[in-house]
Amino acid sequence: MHSPLTQLEQIVLTSDSKNFLREISKWTFFFSIIGFIGIAFLVIGAILLGTIYAPMLDMVGQQQGVASISLGVMITYLVMALLYVMPVLYLFKFSRKMKLALADKNDDILADAFQNLKSHYKFIGVLTIIMISLYVLLIGFSLVAGSLL
């Protein structure tokens, strides 16, 4: 038989659970800050590769028969930075809202925190599926191209 708590769809957090969630929020905050720093490095790298190092990269590219390799590398870095913004932002929002929810004992903020965590993992999961699919396609095309030579 279901207890009244189960019927109301409520869950009680023990002090251990709250401590674990508090510690998780600290670690996710740390990882989100590291993520933002990594995104900043990607953008700075893209700018440097598109400006200062462009002549050197283009010279190497011309030796290989490619007109402008610096633009391609710069765009790649910027796309990678853009892809990482959303999951890092979701992780940051989770850490802040979890800390606030535990401090205020607010169920709505707690639900928002978990929604951000869900969005983080959903984004990472979809991105992982896309990357694995691209790798499989790349390997397939490489095998086909290699067999034609």
Image (cartoon, rainbow, N blue to C red):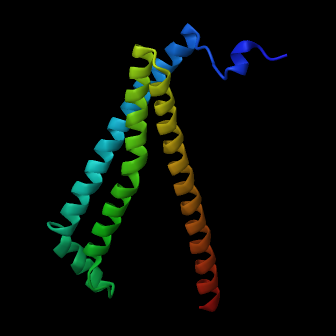
Q: Position of residue 64 (x, y in %)?
A: 33, 84
Q: Nearer the viewer, residue 5 or 138?
A: 5
> Could you tell me which residue is drawn at 59 percent across and 58 percent down?
129
Between 80 and 97, the residue placed more toward the observer is 97
Between 95 and 133, the residue placed more toward the observer is 95
Viewport quadrant of the N terminus: top right
Q: Name the image quarter holding the C terminus.
A: bottom right
Rendered view: 95 above or below 64: above
Picture residue at 43% right of the left edge, 21% below the top: 101
Q: Residue at x 55, y 62 (%)?
A: 130
- Left or right, 149 with respect to 47, comes to right
- Location of residue 65 by image quarter: bottom left
Q: Nearer the viewer, residue 105 or 15?
A: 105
Q: Residue at x 17, y 75 (%)?
A: 55
The image shows residue 74 at horizontal and vertical percentages of: 28, 67
Left or right of 28, for residue 44: left
Where residue 63 appears, as percent x and y from the top left, is 28, 85
Q: Quadrant of residue 35?
A: top left
Q: Residue furthest top?
A: 15
Image coords of residue 126 (percent x, y): 55, 55
